Image (spheres, grey):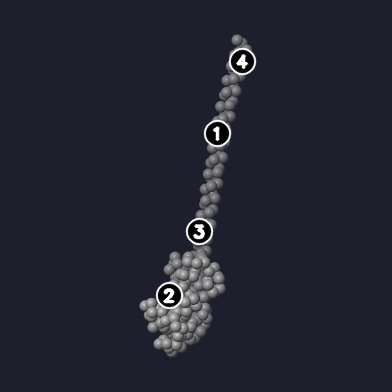
Amino acid sequence: MAYSAVQNSSAVTLEDCTCPICMSILIQPVTMPCTHELCMPCFRKTVEEANLCCPMCRLRIATWARLSTKQKTLVNEIRWKQIQTLFPEKVRRRQEGKDDDDGDLNDEDEPIHHPIVNIAEPGEIRKEYEEQLERLEKQREEERSKEEAESADLIKKLQREEEERARELERQAEEQRIKDEEIARKLAESAEVSVYL
Ligand SMILES: [Zn+2]
Ligand SMILES: [Zn+2]
């Protein structure tokens, strides 16, 4: 289930906390900007090492993944805490490597109708998530303007170099002109002298 649906739901089921790729309990859930969620091992396998697209909706998440990795916000901590609280046994067993992939959604973690308000007010998770997106957007914007400023600086530097080169060429041409005049003058002089010889 997409994260937005979990936020709006008053009761979260084990199915809601199951990775759509490996069908195991969502450990270290990564909530992508499209609100689809994967467990961290599946995210690494299908997204980071492959095509940087959400495997469910093909949304390109390269930039988001890069920034989130850098900021260490890849794991949706609020969601992770929620899953650990609701299904501690499932989480423990998966982390111990005893992955119960028998498709049994009705084992020791039942009953599964824990109200979401035990973890956070419904709006709280959404607010947190929106703030997170806002932070990412702001950082993206800052990086963009920094890159723009850097390229503007580079252009100015290249222009200065270009101007210097032009001045140098001009100076060399002027020197050459003076030398040529000198030679011409000397030739004229010697020609004059030979007339008198
Ligand atoms: Zn998975
Ligand atoms: Zn998606």
Compare marks 3 and 1 and give the one earlier in the sequence.
3
Q: Considering only order in the chain, which callout, 1 or 4, is on the residue closer to the N terminus? A: 1
SS category of the residue bearing label 4: helix
Tell me which label, 4 or 2, sits earlier in the chain: 2
Q: Which residue is drawn at 59% across and 20% down?
A: 187
In front here: 195 or 107?
107
Question: Is ligand 2 closer than 8 angstroms to the Cβ of mark 4?
Answer: no
Q: Which amino acid does label 1 sit on?
A: Gln
Query: Residue 172 got which mark?
Result: 1
Residue 146 in percent (x, y) is at: 50, 58
Q: Which residue is drawn at 52% across and 78% down?
A: 2
**Disc 1 to disc 2, C-alpha distance:** 68 Å
* Residue hosting label 2: 28
> Could you give the CA–CA distance between mark 3 and mark 2, rounded to whole angstroms?
32 Å
Evaluate if marks 4 and 1 touch, with contact meaning CB atoms under 8 Å apart: no
How far apart are labels 4 and 3 at the CA level? Answer: 69 Å
The secondary element bearing badge 2 is classed as loop
The residue closer to the viewer here, 125 or 67, is 67
**Badge 4: few (under 14), some or many (20 or more) residues near its Cα, within 10 Å?**
few
x, y percent for residue 17: 46, 81
Nearest to viewer (mark 4 / mark 2): 2
Q: Earlier in the sequence, mark 1 or mark 2?
A: 2
Q: For the residue carrying disc 2, how many other residues have a C-alpha within 10 Å: few (<14), some (14-19), or many (20+)?
A: many
Q: Mark 1 and mark 3 in contact (Cβ < 8 Å)?
A: no
Callouts 4 and 2 close, C-beta under 8 Å: no
- Camera-side residue: 154 or 82? 82
Identify the element where label 3 is drawn: helix
Q: What residue is pinned by disc 4?
A: 192
